[in-house]
Image (tube, rainbow, N blue to C red):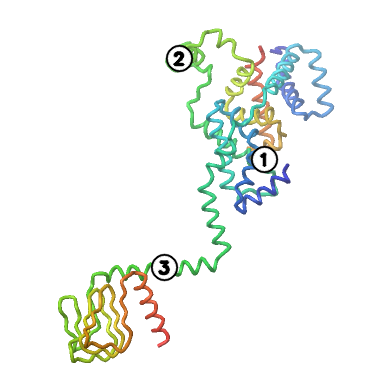
């Protein structure tokens, strides 16, 4: 796959837009998946994934063909997602208490504003529960968990994508796993 | 959790994670295995971690929405045009330089043309007469040389021994009038530029 991609990139550098279309086709699902698991919102994920490819196209001349293209592309995607997560702060973790409303958290907010029957909240599909557990992770753990267990990447590749030392990636994965365990142990 | 072994708990958890990352030496593996066989809490912890991973990995893969690629490509055109122009310039340096030169030349001349647009002027000769914006070569008079009239008319009743050029105006020839050289009327900006260029070029060769 890398070989085809390298050839397409050369064509893109010569101004061939259709060649870029082929690159988008090859990576769109993986990039969209990273964005969706990080942001947990279809529209936001689509926006972020599109932005990723547009940014890649505009900056294609800065890509080093000696390195893996996917690493470069996923770095753009994760950085854009992390930016979006940070901009949205203060974050709204579901079980975080809302200031001045003792005992009231986002679960009750969701239930009251959208008037979901209690059972509907309780019967969230398993997938939703797992996704919410991932979404509840702080963004530095969320990105490593998504890359490791959803994209199934090697630790070294994750370190390259996030431009972090390998040791830091390992620590974050360990902590991310522990945090997830607390959410999911009773499933 | 593993209260009796609280001091070793941290170390065991570290081994668990290293195991999950596939990075345990065989000695460490033995140590972890032996501990898990004797400590229920740690075994529970380890099973929960494995279950957590299995749950996360069980998530169905989702794909990009329909028409995703088209929409990305649709968002690009502006960039390609800029890149296209840049690439074209890189490939045709001579043509670019030449057209840039022409553009600047024309621009400079055009602004001169606009500045001069309303200014009535003509080549001075002692025997020329002026009636409003009309230059008159009186009957019986002889003008030795070229006459240029800008933003006005010329009426030739006498004789001009040379060329007559009228810019933004008209020339009238009386029946007795005579011009030995060429008579030219220039109204359009393009003609005017051509005239100036011609003058500049003949000036170079003079």
Answer with left or right where residue A20 lies relative to residue B116.
right
Element at label 1: helix
Residue B173 position, x and y percent, is 24, 82
Mark with earlier residue (2, 1)? 1
Disc 3 vs disc 1: Cβ atoms closer than 8 Å?
A: no
Nearest the camera: B44 or B161? B161
Disc 2 vs disc 1: Cβ atoms closer than 8 Å?
A: no
Disc 3 vs disc 2: Cβ atoms closer than 8 Å?
A: no
**Chain under numbered label 3:** B
Q: Mark 2 = which residue?
A: A113
Distance (Cα) linking label 3 and label 2: 66 Å
Distance (Cα) linking label 2 and label 1: 41 Å
Q: Mark 1 = which residue?
A: A70
Quadrant of the rendered image containing residue B36: top right
* B149 vs B26: above or below: below
Q: Mark 3 = which residue?
A: B104
Characterize the local packing of mark 2: few (<14), some (14-19) or many (20 or more) Cα atoms within 10 angstroms. Answer: few
Residue A50 position, x and y percent, is 56, 37
Residue located at (44% from left, 13% from top): A101
Answer with left or right where residue A106 lies relative to residue B177.
right
Viewport quadrant of the C terminus of chain B: bottom left
**Chain under numbered label 2:** A
Residue located at (28% from left, 78% from top): B166
Element at label 2: helix
Residue located at (57% from left, 39% from top): B70
**Chain under numbered label 1:** A
Element at label 3: helix
């Amino acid at each position: 796959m890398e070989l085809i991609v390298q050839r397409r990139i050369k064509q893109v550098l010569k101004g061939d837009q259709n060649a870029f279309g082929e690159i988008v086709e090859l990576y769109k699902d993986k990039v969209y998946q990273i964005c969706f698991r990080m942001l947990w919102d279809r529209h936001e994920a689509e926006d972020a994934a599109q932005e990723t490819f547009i940014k890649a196209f505009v900056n294609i001349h800065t890509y080093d063909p000696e390195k893996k293209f996917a690493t470069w592309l996923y770095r753009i995607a994760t950085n854009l997602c992390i930016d979006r997560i940070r901009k949205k702060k203060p974050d709204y973790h579901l079980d975080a208490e809302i200031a001045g409303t003792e005992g009231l958290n986002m679960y009750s907010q969701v239930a009251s504003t959208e008037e979901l029957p209690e059972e509907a909240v309780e019967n969230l599909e398993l997938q939703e529960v797992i996704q919410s557990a991932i979404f509840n992770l702080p963004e530095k753990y969320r990105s490593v968990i998504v890359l490791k267990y959803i994209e199934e990447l090697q630790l070294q590749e994750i370190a390259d994508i996030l431009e972090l030392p390998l040791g830091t990636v390992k620590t974050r994965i360990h902590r991310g796993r522990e945090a997830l365990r607390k959410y999911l142990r009773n499933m | 959790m593993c209260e009796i072994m609280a001091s070793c708990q941290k170390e065991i958890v570290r081994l668990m994670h290293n195991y999950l990352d596939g990075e345990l030496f065989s000695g460490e593996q033995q140590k972890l295995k032996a501990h898990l066989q004797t400590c229920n809490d740690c075994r529970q912890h380890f099973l929960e971690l494995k279950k957590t991973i299995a749950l996360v990995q069980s998530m169905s893969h989702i794909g990009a929405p329909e028409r995703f690629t088209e929409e990305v490509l649709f968002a690009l055109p502006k960039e390609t045009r800029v890149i296209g122009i840049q690439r074209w310039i890189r490939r045709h340096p001579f043509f670019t330089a030449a057209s840039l030169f022409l553009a600047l030349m024309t621009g400079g001349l055009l602004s001169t043309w606009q500045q001069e647009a309303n200014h009535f002027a003509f080549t001075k000769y002692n025997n020329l007469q002026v009636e409003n914006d009309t230059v008159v070569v009186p009957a019986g008079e002889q003008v030795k040389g070229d006459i240029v009239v800008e933003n006005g008319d010329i009426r030739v009743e006498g004789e001009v021994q040379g060329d007559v050029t009228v810019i933004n105006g008209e020339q009238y020839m009386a029946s007795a009038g005579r011009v030995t050289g060429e008579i030219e009327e220039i109204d359009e900006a393009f003609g005017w530029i051509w005239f100036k260029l011609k003058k500049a070029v003949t000036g170079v060769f003079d």
